[in-house]
């Protein structure tokens, strides 16, 4: 029995060492670029290509993410989000998380579970909404933009110095000749491989002119944004969510 446990421990140690080495080999150092007019010009090119005014004018948008398990409605006019997964429904004022209503199977959640569920919903929102609209956030408050030149190509490095659940994350956007994003390299606290690339493909123009990428490939993992609806009223995206109309 002792020999079996010893071999199990050896295998676990070898696996962890191998994982550490592989992570180090696959990781890339974050590049150093130049801030200033050239970086801002590339940011303008991206936002113009994606029709930023059309995105800003959206009132309601709903979508599904993460293998179809997370569902969202966003009232952009007052920055309120409805977040649904499993048996939970969370109505959250995104600028004031204290004003959050949480239900499980239609019943209000008791206080002992409330805070953990609120933070879970907020983490889901920060991650999944970013995969929906990250290009429109390159000039968010607390961001720093730098122009990167690699192998004859120009990219825009955006560092989020504040906000969200993981401040300090950086994304290096690569775009085509028109300014349409095709992928970004990621330096984030939750992914051990630094500089890993994720695609932004399968672009769709929404009613009104805003654009979103519906497919992302991160290594062997493919993530999809689906069931996207936009409109000026709640009924245009989901008429069943009466508790959201407030």
Image (cartoon, rainbow, N blue to C red):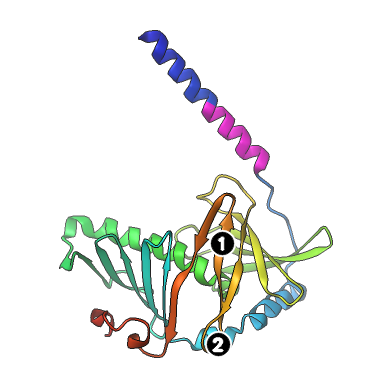
Q: Residues within 10 Å of mark 1 (few under 14, many from 20)?
A: many
Q: Is residue 18 magenta?
A: yes
Q: In the figure, residue 147 lies in which quadrant?
A: bottom right
Residue at left offset 69%, top offset 48%:
29
Image location of residue 149, percent across then percent down: 79, 62
Q: In this orientation, which residue lies closer to the viewer: 96 or 49?
A: 49
User: Which residue sits at x=50%, y=64%?
Assistant: 224
Secondary structure of the residue carrying numbered label 1: strand
Residue 34 appears at what percent x and percent y? 75, 65
> Is 20 placed left or right of 120 in the picture?
right
Image vertical order of residue 217 relative to residue 28, above or below: below
Task: Estimate the x, y position of residue 229 in percent, counting from the top left.
Answer: 43, 80
In this rendering, the count of numbered labels is 2
Q: Residue at x 72, y 68 (%)?
A: 35
Residue 239: which quarter of the image? bottom left
- Work out whether residue 159 or residue 51 is closer to the camera in this orientation and state it: 51
Q: Is residue 172 at least partly visible in the picture?
A: no
The region drawn magenta spans 15-26
Which residue in the protein does label 1 denote? 216
Quarter of the C terminus within the rendering: bottom left
Q: What residue does disc 2 label? A: 54
Residue 91 sits inside the magenta stretch: no
Query: Can you say whether 16 is above or below 78 in the image?
Result: above
Upstream in the sequence, badge 1 or badge 2? 2
Q: Is residue 246 above or below residue 137?
A: below
Please say if 239 is above or below 223.
below
Question: In what element is the residue under mark 2?
Answer: helix
Q: Quadrant of the N terminus?
A: top left
On the image, the x and y values in percent for residue 181 come to: 66, 70
**Which residue occupies the extreme right position in the image?**
152
């Amino acid at each position: 029995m002792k020999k079996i446990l010893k071999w199990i421990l050896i295998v676990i140690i070898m696996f962890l060492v191998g994982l550490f080495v592989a992570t180090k080999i696959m990781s890339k150092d974050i590049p150093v670029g130049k801030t200033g007019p050239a970086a801002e010009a590339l940011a303008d090119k991206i936002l113009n290509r994606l029709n930023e005014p059309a995105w800003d004018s959206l009132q309601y948008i709903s979508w599904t993410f993460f293998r179809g398990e997370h569902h969202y409605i966003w009232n952009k006019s007052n920055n309120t989000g409805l977040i649904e997964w499993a048996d939970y429904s969370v109505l959250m004022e995104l600028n004031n998380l204290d004003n959050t209503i949480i239900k499980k199977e239609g019943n209000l959640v008791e206080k002992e579970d409330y805070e953990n569920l609120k933070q879970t919903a907020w983490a889901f929102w920060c991650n999944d909404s970013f995969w929906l609209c990250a290009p429109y956030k390159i000039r968010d408050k607390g961001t720093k933009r730098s122009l990167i030149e690699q192998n004859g190509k120009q990219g825009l490095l955006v560092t989020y110095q504040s906000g969200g659940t993981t401040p300090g994350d950086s994304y290096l956007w690569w775009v085509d000749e028109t300014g349409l994003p095709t992928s970004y390299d990621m330096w984030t606290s939750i992914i051990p491989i630094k500089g890993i690339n994720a695609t932004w493909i399968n672009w769709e123009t929404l009613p009104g002119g805003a654009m979103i990428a519906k497919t992302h490939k991160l290594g062997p993992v493919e993530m999809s944004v689906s069931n996207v609806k936009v409109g000026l009223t709640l009924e245009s995206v989901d008429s069943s969510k009466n508790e959201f109309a407030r």
